[in-house]
Image: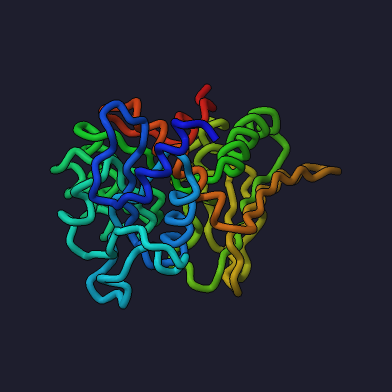
């Protein structure tokens, strides 16, 4: 281990309120929804990182974790208490990672904009008006927003862009997604993003060509549509398949998540990317250099 790496580890252990040394490349990260499943995964990933430090932990006021050490579930004292106070939770952070609900994310967005704190937004289910609020805030702070932070998912999106261009005629397109029983929005943000990428590659508007439900006598399938099917059950982390069904053959492009750790690692890559950005709205294609 290098002296520089050891120094970063020493800073992380010293306590969340301590500022990093002058010229340090350490990223001070706050986590929203800190006591949830994704929040725990993010905190664990930050603790394991050599260049990121937990600097704040936010949750709703009714959470039983309020006041507890954010890393207590790991048997570790981080010195960062879980709080509902946005000022306390963001006061020492460079970036907030938010995988909560749209209303909560927008409240955090306002606070981050006021304080100059950058954001990584993995929340899904935003309305068009809510998305417009994020676009407006990006005039003042740098934001990475993506429905899925997984590196593998975003490489899959690039593959879908290429496949759609090559299979633009003669193939019916269906997006099938499956998630755990607790997920509250459908289709998933990732499935919708897949549809958007495909529609854009085909020169279509997803709002005009998406089909989200079929029941009864539906008539023949319109070849210009993109269909969506949703499965909810058990503890499925996230499975997505896009089917290109032609005459005599089918092409399936599938991504399956076995752990939320992939989302956490992608989020930290977004944090590092934001270190070089002052303002603007970006996505994981920007972070991973996949932009055409």
Viewer-side residue, 227 vs 184: 184
The residue at the point 56 percent across, 69 percent down is 180
Query: On screen, 73 above or below 246?
Result: below
Viewer-side residue, 178 vs 260: 260
Toward the front, the furthest residue is: 3
Query: On screen, 142 above or below 244?
Result: above
- Rendered location of residue 133, percent (x, y): 23, 44
- Rendered location of residue 171, percent (x, y): 71, 40
Q: Quadrant of the N terminus?
A: top right
- Rendered location of residue 56, percent (x, y): 28, 54
- Rendered location of residue 234, percent (x, y): 60, 74
The residue at the point 53 percent across, 73 percent down is 181
Viewer-side residue, 195 vs 225: 195
- Colour scheme of the picture: rainbow
Q: How many marks?
A: 0
The residue at the point 27 percent across, 60 percent down is 104
Viewer-side residue, 36 vs 241: 36
- Left or right, 269 with reference to 137: right
- Left or right, 72 with reference to 173: left
Toward the right, the furthest residue is: 248
The residue at the point 58 percent across, 46 percent down is 225
């Amino acid at each position: 281990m290098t002296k520089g790496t050891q120094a970063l580890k020493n800073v992380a252990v010293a306590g969340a309120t301590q500022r990093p040394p002058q010229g340090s490349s350490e990223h001070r990260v706050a986590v929203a929804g800190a006591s949830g499943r994704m929040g725990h995964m993010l905190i664990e990933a930050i603790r394991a990182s050599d260049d990121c430090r937990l600097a704040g932990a936010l949750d709703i006021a009714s959470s039983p974790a309020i006041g507890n050490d954010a890393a207590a579930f790991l048997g570790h004292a981080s010195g960062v208490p879980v709080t509902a106070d946005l000022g306390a939770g963001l006061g020492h952070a460079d970036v907030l990672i938010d995988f909560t609900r749209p209303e909560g994310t927008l409240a955090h967005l306002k606070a981050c904009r006021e304080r100059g704190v950058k954001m990584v937004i993995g929340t899904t289910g935003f309305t068009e008006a809510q998305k417009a609020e994020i676009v407006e805030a990006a005039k003042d702070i740098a934001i990475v927003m993506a429905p899925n932070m997984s590196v593998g998912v975003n490489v899959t999106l690039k593959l879908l862009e290429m496949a759609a261009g090559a299979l633009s005629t003669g193939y019916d397109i269906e997006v099938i997604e499956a998630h755990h029983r607790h997920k509250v929005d459908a289709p998933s943000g990732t499935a919708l993003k897949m549809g958007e990428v495909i529609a854009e590659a085909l020169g279509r508007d997803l709002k005009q060509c998406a089909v989200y439900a079929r029941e009864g006598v539906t008539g023949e399938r319109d070849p210009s549509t993109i269909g969506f099917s949703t499965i909810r059950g058990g503890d499925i982390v996230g499975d997505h398949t896009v089917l290109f069904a032609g005459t005599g053959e089918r092409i399936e492009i599938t991504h399956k998540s076995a752990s939320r750790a992939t989302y956490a690692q992608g989020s930290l890559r977004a944090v590092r990317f934001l270190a070089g950005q002052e303002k603007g709205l970006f996505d994981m294609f920007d972070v991973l250099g996949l932009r055409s």
